[in-house]
């Protein structure tokens, strides 16, 4: 069914130490937004990534593929169609975006400087922090 691009990306993600530590943690479990559609896809993805890391056996991805198919029917801005040739990089982008959206939150970021004598480096640092604050004002997650 031309799902090798999916399996390749899942294998790659299973070797990301930071991502796997997060996904295996209680933090991830608590961060999952159950108020969004496709909650099951997030849970199934978590299960597969954990199994890929700890199991020596073949992993059945049929349930994940089924949930993914449902998701793609309503949210396919990436043009990914199961059963056809697809680019792995497009699927990776879709999957990371999906994961981000399902654990994201609106952060509270406060930037304050007490010293009034700012060096050129301090000003650049402040501008950088302000830019990141603006970028993440609506949505932040540990996936980013």
Image: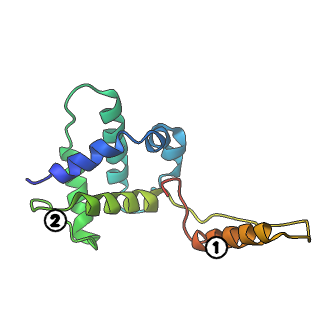
Residue on which disc 1 sits: 131
Q: Quadrant of residue 37?
A: bottom left
> Which label number is shown at residue 92?
none
Q: Is residue 48 visible?
A: yes
**Residue closest to the far top:** 56
Residue found 79% across the figure and 71% down from its top: 120
Q: Does 53 sit above or below residue 127? A: above
Residue 21 image position (x, y, % from top left): 48, 38
Determine whether the residue tagged by mark 1 lies in a helix, strand or loop. helix
Quadrant assignment, res 48: top left
| Rendered position, 110 above or below 55 | below
User: In x, y percent, where is residue 64?
Assistant: 24, 48
Tell me: 38 left or right of 28.
left
- Percent x, y of residue 74: 26, 71
Where 7 falls versus 74 (above or below)? above
Q: Position of residue 96 (x, y in %)?
A: 38, 58
In the picture, measured across the screen, residue 52 lies left or right of residue 80, that is right
Residue at the spot 48% in from the left edge and 44% down from the top edge: 29
- Badge 1 or badge 2: first in the primary sequence: 2
Q: Nearer the viewer, residue 101 or 122?
A: 122
Rendered image coloring scheme: rainbow
Judged from the image, the secondary structure of the residue bearing numbered disc 2 is loop
In this rendering, position of residue 108 left or right of residue 43:
right
| For discs 1 and 2, the disc positioned in front in the rendered view | 1
Mark number, residue 81 = 2
């Amino acid at each position: 069914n031309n799902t090798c691009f999916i399996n390749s990306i899942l294998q790659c993600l299973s070797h990301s130490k930071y991502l796997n530590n997060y996904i295996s943690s209680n933090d991830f479990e608590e961060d999952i937004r159950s108020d969004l559609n496709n909650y099951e896809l997030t849970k199934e993805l978590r299960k597969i990534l954990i199994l890929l890391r700890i199991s020596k056996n073949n992993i059945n991805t049929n349930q994940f593929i089924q949930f993914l198919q449902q998701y793609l029917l309503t949210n396919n801005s990436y043009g990914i169609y199961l059963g056809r040739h697809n680019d792995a990089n497009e699927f990776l982008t879709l999957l990371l975006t999906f994961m981000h959206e399902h654990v994201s939150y609106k952060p509270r970021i406060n930037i304050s400087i007490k010293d009034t004598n700012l060096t050129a480096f301090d000003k650049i640092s402040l501008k950088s922090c302000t830019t990141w604050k603006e970028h993440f004002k609506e949505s932040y997650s540990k996936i980013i």
